[in-house]
Image (cartoon, helix red, strand yellow):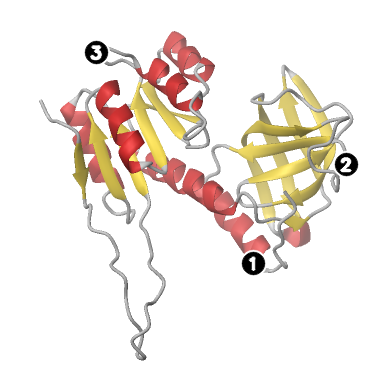
Amino acid sequence: METATAISAAKYQPQTDSTGNAAMTISRKKALLVDDAELLLDLEKDILAGEDLDVLAAVNAHQALDLITRESPDIIFIDLYMPGMDGDELCRRIKNDPRFKGTPVIMVTGSHQDEGRQRCEAAGCDALLLKPIDRQKMVEITRNHLETENLLSLRVAAQMRVRYGFGGEILTDFAVNLSAGGIFLETDRPLPENTTLQIAFDLPAGGGQINCRGKVAWVNGEEKMAPRLPMGMGIQFLNLGLKEMNALRGYLVKREIRSDW
């Protein structure tokens, strides 16, 4: 059985410019794959091989916890069913650890296993990757969540009507600001944190339509966390496709990006 490994582990080395001064060191991001099935680990490694990541692998939860503590990966893919400790329990431990709770955790489970999908969502995962694993879908999820981590705090003012579905009801509110990672909606009836919903809105000036799943990341209630913002909720995008992600990026680069959160 394969032990915990690091694939493509070479780092960018510090460089010097023409004057001999040290240049900025660039650190590659890390992805951790957790699965007791070697064939699936090999498939996932192959999918991420072209993504310029350091890819770590563990065959059980205990190896994964050790790697997480030592390596602080930027994104984690976990199979639901594993010996010793199932993936949903591992996900809970990660999300309950203040050091790592912000790390995107993607649970991997069968597409026809409704009970398994419910367990994954109840554990607090950030997204689901369904088996059989689709190469393009795994790449999209990886790029989306790493981009969210990089740009979540960078946003532009954006007033647009946003439609979102929750519990069979379709609601409409207006955005206040927008980033590649999420959107803030002004509303006097914000939903609880971690609520998942479906979001749809049109980017200004014919920039395209965004339609994706989202999660309430934080709430600006009566006791405001962000005094400059109205009552409302910050929603994190969960499953942006490549076309929608590119549309968002194209819109953002045309605007002056500023930090509001």
Q: Quadrant of the N terminus?
A: top left
Disc 3 target residue: 83
Tell me if mark 1 has few (under 14), some (14-19) or many (20+) residues whose alpha carbon lies within 10 angstroms of its own. few
Instruction: Note whether 101 is above or below 178 in the view shown.
Output: above
Q: Residue furthest top?
A: 115
Give the label on residue 208, or none: none
CB atoms at circles 1 and 3 under 8 Å apart?
Answer: no
Quote the CA–CA distance across marks 3 and 2: 48 Å
Query: In the rendered structure, which amino acid carries the disc numbered 1?
Result: Val
Q: Is residue 157 left or right of residue 237?
A: right
Instruction: Out of 232 and 172, give the one closest to the viewer.
Output: 232
Element at label 1: helix
Query: In the rendered structure, which amino acid carries the disc numbered 3?
Result: Pro
Disc 1 target residue: 253
Tell me if mark 3 has few (under 14), some (14-19) or many (20+) residues whose alpha carbon lies within 10 angstroms of its own. few
Looking at marks 1 and 3 on the same chain, the residue that comes earlier in the sequence is marked by 3
Q: Is residue 89 left or right of residue 42?
A: right
Quadrant of residue 60 within the rendered picture: top left
Q: Image point 31% across, 39% down: which residue?
A: 70
Quadrant of residue 107 within the rendered picture: top left
Query: In the rendered structure, which amino acid carries the disc numbered 2?
Result: Pro
Q: Image point 72% across, 48% down: which residue?
A: 261
Q: Return the x and y of residue 25 as percentages of the image width and height.
A: 38, 67
Instruction: Note whether 110 is above or below 161 in the view shown.
Output: above
Between disc 1 and disc 3, the foreground one is: 3
Disc 2 target residue: 230
Q: Image point 40% across, 20% down: which residue?
A: 111
